[in-house]
């Protein structure tokens, strides 16, 4: 990595915190540690972090609650650690805005690879920059605005809505193909082509997350419609700025 990214590790197990701090520092990352949500919030109030490694099972507020709270105000990348291993827990983590998850016990080298992957797709990776360079700077749709340079999504009232890196690339794929039915395979190809590690089984979850952010009623979507037997379609006019 060209720069020393600042990582925050939140885990109530001291051995894991110390192991990750030593290992990640050895690989050029700057690392802060916290044992619970309260300690995490204190650090986040005074420091800026490039990525958060967040344990699912924590004393006090659990990782799902903390992830949801972080995501309401920030698009900082989040990798969740879970010892549960159940599919439903991973899905819930993705739904509240985690960018990736790693089950315990884990190999530190695998976690490092996941960290690098998330950071690459969040911070100006070359393949994403090349594609964005040919995209309009500003997309307008249904009174919403997406700035592709700042990656800021603005709702009809002018408030900013935080997007994860994967949500951003997914929305960008729809905006580049308005009123076109995209199959799951199409979406997978478009999103992966922009540097995101997304799997076919996760497409529906990602669509659900995005709907919750841009639809007045996510249960009866008007913007991102499900086309039975076909896939999904952004059903609105899109203009460029």
Image: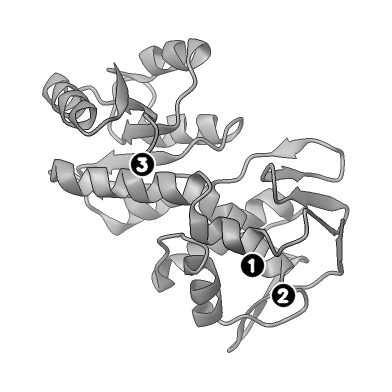
Do tag 2 and tag 3 residues touch (Cβ < 8 Å)? no
Disc 3 versus disc 1: nearer the observer: 1
Please state if 74 lies on the left or on the right of 39 as rendered.
Answer: right
In-front residue for pair 205/4: 4
For label 1, count other residues whose C-alpha is less than 10 Å away and answer few (under 14), some (14-19) or many (20+): many
Please tell me which residue is depicted at 80% across the width and 44% down the height of the picture: 155
Where residue 205 appears, as percent x and y from the top left, is 49, 61
Can you tell which quarter of the image residue 232 is in?
A: bottom right
In-front residue for pair 107/29: 29
Please tell me which residue is depicted at 16% across the width and 45% down the height of the picture: 109
Please tell me which residue is depicted at 81% across the width and 50% down the height of the picture: 145
Q: Name the quadrant of the N terminus.
A: top left
Do tag 2 and tag 1 residues touch (Cβ < 8 Å)? yes
Looking at the rendered structure, the secondary structure element under dot 3 is strand
Q: Name the quadrant of the C terminus.
A: bottom right
Residue at numbered disc 1:
173
Disc 2 versus disc 3: nearer the observer: 2
Looking at the rendered structure, the secondary structure element under dot 2 is loop
| Label disc, if present, on residue 79 of the rendered structure | 3
Looking at the rendered structure, the secondary structure element under dot 1 is helix
Display colour scheme? one colour
Please state if 9 lies on the left or on the right of 137 as rendered.
Answer: left
> Distance of mark 2 from mark 3, alpha carbons?
30 Å
**Extreme bottom residue here?**
229
For label 2, count other residues whose C-alpha is less than 10 Å away and answer few (under 14), some (14-19) or many (20+): some
Q: Earlier in the sequence, mark 3 or mark 1?
A: 3
Residue at numbered disc 2:
177
Please state if 78 lies on the left or on the right of 89 as rendered.
Answer: right
Residue 70 at least partly seen: yes
Q: Earlier in the sequence, mark 2 or mark 3?
A: 3
């Amino acid at each position: 990595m060209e720069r020393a990214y600042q990582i925050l590790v939140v885990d109530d197990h001291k051995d894991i915190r110390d192991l990750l701090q030593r290992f990640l520092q050895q690989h050029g990352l700057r690392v802060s540690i916290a044992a619970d949500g309260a300690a995490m919030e204190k650090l986040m109030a005074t420091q800026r972090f490039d990525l958060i490694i967040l344990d699912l099972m924590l004393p006090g507020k659990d990782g799902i609650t903390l992830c949801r709270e972080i995501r309401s105000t920030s698009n900082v990348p989040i990798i969740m650690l879970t010892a549960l291993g159940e599919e439903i827990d991973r899905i819930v983590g993705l739904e509240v805005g985690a960018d990736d998850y790693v089950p315990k016990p884990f190999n530190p080298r695998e976690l490092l690879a996941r960290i690098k992957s998330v950071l690459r797709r969040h911070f100006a990776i070359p393949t994403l920059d090349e594609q964005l360079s040919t995209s309009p700077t500003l997309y307008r749709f249904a009174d919403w605005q997406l700035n592709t340079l700042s990656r800021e999504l603005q709702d009809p009232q002018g408030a900013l809505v935080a997007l994860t890196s994967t949500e951003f690339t997914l929305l960008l794929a729809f905006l580049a193909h308005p009123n076109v039915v995209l199959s799951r395979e199409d979406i997978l190809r478009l999103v992966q082509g922009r540097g995101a590690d997304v799997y076919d089984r996760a497409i529906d979850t990602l669509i659900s997350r995005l709907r919750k952010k841009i639809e007045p009623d996510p249960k009866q979507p008007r913007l991102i419609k499900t086309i039975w037997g076909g896939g999904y379609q952004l059903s609105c006019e899109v203009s460029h700025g």
